[in-house]
Image (tube, grey):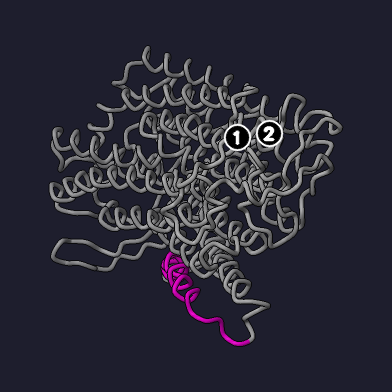
Amino acid sequence: MITLNETVLQLLLVAVVVLPLIGAGAALLPAPPGLRGRNPDQAVLRHGVTVTGAVLLGSLVLAAGFDLDRPGAMQAESDISWIPAFGVRLHFGVDGISLPLLVLTALLTFLCALYSYFVKPPQNAPSAKAFVALLLVLETGVLATFAVLDLVLFFLAFEMVLIPMYFLIARWGGEGRARAAWRFVLYTLLGSVVMLLGLLLVGLQAGTFDMVALATDNGASLSRTTQLIAVLAIGVGLAVKTPMWPLHSWLPDAHTAAPTVGSVLLAGVLLKMGTYGLVRIVLPIAPEGAAYFAPYLAAFAAVGIIYGSLACLALVRQGAGGDLKRLIAYSSVGHMGFVLLGIATLTRTGVNGALFANIAHGLITGLLFFLVGALKERTGTTDLDRLAADRGAALYARAPRFGGLLAFAAVASLGLPGLAGFWGEMLALLGAFHPADGLSRPAYLVFMAVGGFGTLLTAAYLLLVVRRVCMGDPAHAPALATGPTGPGAGERAPAAVGAPGAAAEGDDAAAPGVPAEERAGGRETAPAPTTGALPDVRGYEFAAWTPLVALTLLAGLWPAVLLHLTDPAVQNLLPGVSR
């Protein structure tokens, strides 16, 4: 830990949030002489790496200057009046809950920018300038969501991410991208309208939109009826973004169609915005409403755990034509179910488990989407039946380091002890074993048992993925259409002739700038099949993936690093809760 005075910390936090937005504007300008590189695209992609690297460095310095002796208190706090007539203030700050999410966002965005510098957007897609600008605007929105302490600012930051993610999917995505992008926006916008009404109700009834003051008040200025209405409205909007079953149906399409960096950020940080809102806003500001709806939230979470696992088992079986990206998307429904279950226990143990599972899911699922994107670049497909056929894809033999990384990410995702995925799910289940006073313990024991069974199903489908993709005889590996294999290759490798799930004609007619043959599934440009060795982990992939592997190991072997940050902050948000 380094010693920084409060003013420096304040300026540093504001700079971390604002710098990507300034960088987004600069990305649209011509590159200065001497920084243009070999071509304009290289220059702007380098700009993206530089800006996101500076933001990551700022977040690490902020974390180093964070006072670990009082992680439950708001630090680096700045509070300036913005719209006095409505009491809206530019209020920023971080504590032990928001700091890890802030650093995770900065890290994943930097790794995505670094990866995109080498795996460039396709030449026939919109310009790299737009890509980098959207990536930086998205980073600003997510960082602001975790740093603001005003309900109106929270809503604005929460909504800020929608437009850049829509265009990242619609312009740089794969098959079905137009429909997936529209579903993403429509679902989240409808949920956000309801959430806004709930936030306004709380602010107007309590006489302030300040989240710190509202949390300190702990619902004293809100009637029971107001709390019930507010929790229902706010909870629906946050549940869509989480996503909670049955409000999850936008997620598989969005992940399947999104480019690799879009999937990494969507799973790694955007899904965390919903659960963060539940912990930061709903639990401390409306405790009576939270207690009333907690059993319903736990029930939906338990169903989501089983549903996500069963959907993955259906996708992984031979002959189902399952897509690996779609499978990981459904796995997120199950994993986020554990996060929601932990929150629904209203205990320190459960909420700490939820916060830990949030970070673990961001690290592990981010790594999984990086790996699956690289696999598609190498083979031209993420269809399990085409990858594995009936004898397996034999990644262990054809690209041993790549196959080993995929197996590592899979066992981390299933919650193997010693890796990050274990602790969050275990603490969420322990919280359900002893829920908060006033909640039905028999009901929560059922939810705990259902969640425990879900861990077995999770292990089953992820081990099947490892068996089908990593194992097998390379001599009998299926013939695949290999995509580009060198740095600078685009992500959208053309699909093979007759590939299952190829887009129907007109599927993406609404997305301009995409050649007709690509909208038709690439049938006119399919590359030649191969059964030989695949390129193993490249240098830039090693640089992008190593931090996620290292942090997954660190969080699994030394969970106190994170829990010592979150637990005091959770105590402040849940006064009177002893366990």
Q: Amino acid at mark 1?
A: Pro
Query: From mark 2 to mark 1, how far is it between C-alphas?
Result: 8 Å
Q: What is the magenta segment's predominant secondary structure? A: helix
**Numbered tag placed on residue 488 in the rendering:** none
Lower position in the chain sequence, tag 2 or tag 1: 2
CA neighbours of label 1 inside 10 A, class few (<14), some (14 to 19), many (20+): some
Q: Amino acid at mark 2?
A: Arg
**Numbered tag placed on residue 500 in the rendering:** 1
Going by the image, does 345 lie left or right of 151? right
Camera sees residue 74: no
Q: Is residue 200 inside the magenta stretch?
A: no
Q: Percent x, y for residue 59?
A: 52, 61
**Numbered tag placed on residue 386 in the rendering:** 2
- Residue under the image location 63 percent in, 62 percent down: 120
Q: Percent x, y for residue 112?
A: 59, 57
Count of picture labels: 2
Q: Percent x, y for residue 454?
A: 52, 21
Q: To which quarter of the image does residue 529 belong? A: top right
User: Foreground: 564 or 295?
Assistant: 295
- Residue under the image location 29 percent in, 37 percent down: 236
Q: Quadrant of the N terminus?
A: bottom right
User: Foreground: 13 or 464?
Assistant: 464
First to last magenta residue range: 8-33
